[in-house]
Amino acid sequence: MADEKRAREEHWRNEQQRMNAIEIERTNISDIMTENFATTASQLAPHRYVPYHFKGLRPGQIDGINQERENQVEYKKAAIKNQNTEEYQWAVQNLANTQHFLNNELDLEQRQRQMAAQHRDQHLVDKEAKDARWPNMYGDLNPIPDVTKNMVSGANPRAIK
């Protein structure tokens, strides 16, 4: 049993040493440890540079890249500001259009009321003129009926209140 345990521990130790050696070899041949200039370019866009990795570039190239980045940031800020300004102007125009529409609605409603009042007044004037010309168009002596007299046979006459 002790021999099996020693063999197992030795096998584990040998496996650990083998894995450590593989890891060291991978690290030594990786792009981080070598002078591979392809690592300076972005994997997603080869025309761009990784901001923290300028391997093999001269200081003038690094300054040019940083200046271009700064210009891009300023351009983006200006574009966002212009977009916000444009959205604000659209909102102001939309508000002005809505206010103009509401004012037109109020004006149309007032005109309609005014026309209805004029029509009503003209109707009353016309009715008075017609009543003056035709005081009793059915030829009755008394244009307003007298309901105090007995209109139904056998009914008791009563006064209307």
Image: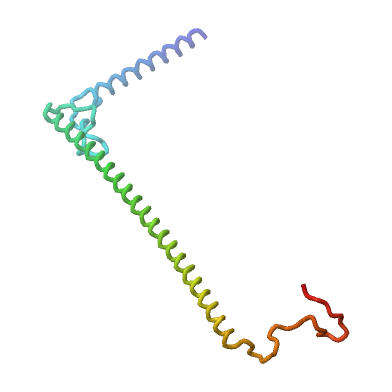
Query: Left or right of 53: which side holds 92?
Result: right
Q: Position of residue 118 (x, y in %)?
A: 48, 73
Tally of numbered tags: 0
Query: Left or right of 5: which side holds 133?
Result: right
Q: Position of residue 15 (x, y in %)?
A: 38, 17
Q: Position of residue 106 (x, y in %)?
A: 44, 61
Residue 42 location, quadrant:
top left
Name the residue: 20% across, 34% down.
70
Seen from this angle, which residue lies furthest right?
Answer: 154
The correct choice, above or below, for 79 with respect to 104 in the image is: above
The correct choice, above or below, for 32 with respect to 100 in the image is: above
Name the residue: 25% across, 25% down.
30
Residue 25 location, quadrant:
top left
Q: Position of residue 84 (x, y in %)?
A: 31, 44
Seen from this angle, which residue lies furthest top?
Answer: 2
Residue 101 location, quadrant:
bottom left
User: Between residues 102 and 150, which one lies in front from this camera angle?
Assistant: 150
Quadrant assignment for the C terminus: bottom right
Name the residue: 24% across, 24% down.
32
Name the residue: 86% across, 86% down.
153
Q: Which color mode does the image show?
A: rainbow
User: Between residues 56 and 113, which one lies in front from this camera angle?
Assistant: 113
